[in-house]
Image (cartoon, helix red, strand yellow):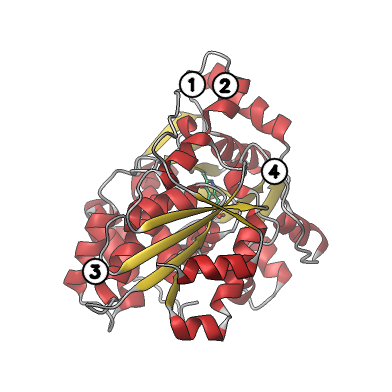
Amino acid sequence: MPESIPQLPASFYAEIENLSDSEIATTALWPFVEGSLTREELQTIVSETLSFPTPVKHIYGDVHVLELFHGPTMAFKDVGARFMSRCLSHFVEKGSETTVLVATSGDTGSAVAHGFANVEGIKVKILFPKGKVSPFQEYQMTSLGGNIQALEVDGTFDDCQALVKQAFSDSNLNEQVQLSSANSINVARFLPQMTYYFLAYKQLKKTLSGKKLIVSVPSGNFGNLTAGLIAKRMGLPIHQFVAANNSNDTFYQYLTTGHYTPKKSVATYSNAMDVGAPSNFERIEFLYDKNLASIKSDILGFTFTNKQTLDEIQQIYNLHEYVLDPHGAVGHAGLKAHLQENEVGLFLETAHPKKFESVVKQALPSYPIHDVNLKGCSKISMNNSYAEFVNHILTP
Ligand SMILES: *Cc1c(COP(=O)(O)O)cnc(C)c1O
């Protein structure tokens, strides 16, 4: 967690529409890296990270979408993964080696794999739950080879996450290898995600004309939402956030009952949000001094079933000819459930529908399915066993 969160000057927000995207992102991230990177180094990392657009599009009425799927693996995680990989390779000492461990429910693994492919001095071990990622995601994780190794675990995403967390707290292991995390517990991955909230505001500012901005974030591990909360702390005029959950509604239950009760994740159509114990929960608590009332005044929660997800995809397509992916569908449903007069709504479309085409096809039978060829891809199968995992970490 950053030690402090600076306010950006009012002049920055007053003139944001005249600044380039890379200037905006550099200005937002600078206070957090000052002293570790030069402004030029940050600028370079930022331009390499945001080498694709993050457009806001109008869908209907006061509802807009922020499309975060224009990166190489077609999900918003490209932003964090690219920023983090470039930071890590900047800091890795010449001649040494760092092993990056990452647990994924699908999109993190592919974004991290592509972010780190062929980066010198870095090996990546990706853990994904067997049979619970889409063929397209599996292809993206297992087709690179080289320094990227995919481990298919006979278990759930939470099992994968638990194995990775155990490795980080294993002092014996940490004496033998230099480990780094690539999940949104890594500050270099979750923090750069705040940049597109600023870029969205730049695009929407004129449209707001006195109305309040509500941003709905389809959430799993809550890294994306936490980055948005930090942007708000820095003065970005977002009135409230909607945390949109699928049936893995630990956070929604927390908002409703005041009790945080992690549970086992269940498989849903929006599988990148199948998280029963969101790893950024503690960050949110910390931001609000564990005060439930203030958390609730900034974040509204909703939860949606698979059926509601499909209905949402169908409806938005039938009414507005916009194809949602299942995560964006949950995000839109959350926005719709809350949005009031005098508010402008923005929801995050976190992945391209093509990544989840078999789900989209259930809602829109005419949606094309692309054949994914996993031939030539490589993965290693393992049990949900820490001892086995350590062996894989220690084998070159
Ligand atoms: C990871 C992911 C999410 C959830 O983001 P968190 O930061 O984990 O809350 C939502 N949608 C898609 C497509 C994702 O890949």
Q: Which residue is mark 4?
A: 267
| Quarter location, residue 75 | top left
Q: Are marks 2 and 1 in contact (CB under 8 Å)?
A: yes
Disc 3: CA contacts within 10 A as few (<14), some (14-19) or many (>=20): many
Q: Which residue is mark 1?
A: 369
Residue 42: mark: 3
Q: Are marks 4 and 2 in contact (CB under 8 Å)?
A: no
Judged from the image, the secondary structure of the residue bearing numbered disc 4 is loop
Q: Earlier in the sequence, mark 4 or mark 3?
A: 3
Q: CA distance from mark 1 to mark 4?
A: 21 Å
Q: Earlier in the sequence, mark 2 or mark 3?
A: 3
Q: Which residue is mark 2?
A: 361
Question: Foreground mark, 2 or 3?
Answer: 2
- Amino acid on which the number 2 mark rests in the picture: Lys
- Amino acid on which the number 4 mark rests in the picture: Ala
Question: Foreground mark, 2 or 1?
Answer: 1
